[in-house]
Image (tube, rainbow, N blue to C red):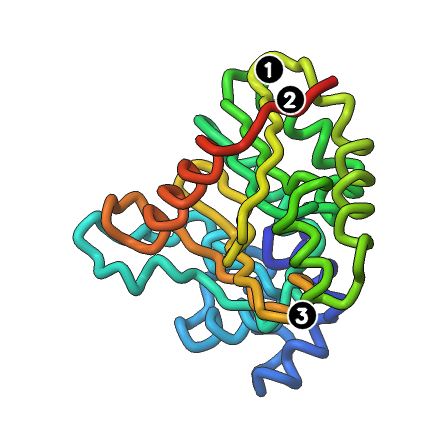
Amino acid sequence: MNHPLARALRSAGLTVIDVAERLDVDPKTVQRWTSGRMPYPRHRDALVKLTGWTAYDLWPNLPRPSASTPAATEVRIVYPHRSSVPSDAWARLLSRAEREIDILAYSALFLAEDASVPSLLRDKASNGVRVRIALGDPDGQHIANRGTEERVGTGMSVRIRTALVNLQPLTGVPGITVRLHDTVLYNSFCRADDEMLVNPHVYGSPAAHAPVLHLASGNNDGMSSTHIAAFERVWGSAKPLKD
């Protein structure tokens, strides 16, 4: 039962019987899927929605889109809000990075508080992956404005400071750079090579209540490249984190 689908079902708290009832199939069919048999496309789509895992996480051998595939295929899955993203999805994304990791947010406290993430970032950096983390400047005017918009006041700055405390062991690690920005963010995102989880911001609502898009593309003119270009602009204006 080590097939990714079996792990995804356990993570989602779903049994073989649950899945069989929801998809109107025989439980033995579901068992065959968890043993490695490939479901029909309509069932694959349903399993992606049930588990919250991408099709490529559930079935790593699925053919990848070619470079000529339209940009619309960049969207692997859309979550209605960040809190509906499986808790291990962020770490699984980061674990696939082979070249670079970029994190852009105001606080990214939910990542900083995940005990597996700092150690994962350290391991990636030791293997030659460039890691860049851009968080909000807790003393910045735009960060204060965001706190006002969310009606949390200085709570935004407090979350950033808490995240920085949790990430402090990473400062000074070769290959990892942390900077602080004072920018109006329209999206937060977590990027690993050509994949990213993008969290659009909604006025007056915390990021956890906004949707998340899982994008994956090697194209130079798609949505992913637009977000990467925005990150580079923020990164260029951000200031290094002082010890």
Residue 77 location in percent, x, y? 48, 64
Mark 2: which amino acid?
A: Asp
Residue 148 location in percent, x, y? 72, 63
Residue that numbered label 2 is attached to:
123
Circle 3 residues within 10 Å: few <14, some 14–19, many ≥20: few
> At numbered mark 3, what does the secondary structure look like: helix, strand or loop?
loop
Residue 108 location in percent, x, y? 68, 46
Give the vertical position of 25 relative to 230 (above or below): below
Circle 2 residues within 10 Å: few <14, some 14–19, many ≥20: few
Comes first in the chain, label 1 or label 3: 1
Residue that numbered label 1 is attached to:
126
> At numbered mark 2, what does the secondary structure look like: helix, strand or loop?
helix
Circle 1 residues within 10 Å: few <14, some 14–19, many ≥20: some
Residue ID at (71%, 78%): 18
Question: Of the numbered discs in the image, which one, if any, rests on residue 205?
Answer: 3
Residue ID at (59%, 52%): 4
- Residue 30 visible in the current orientation: no
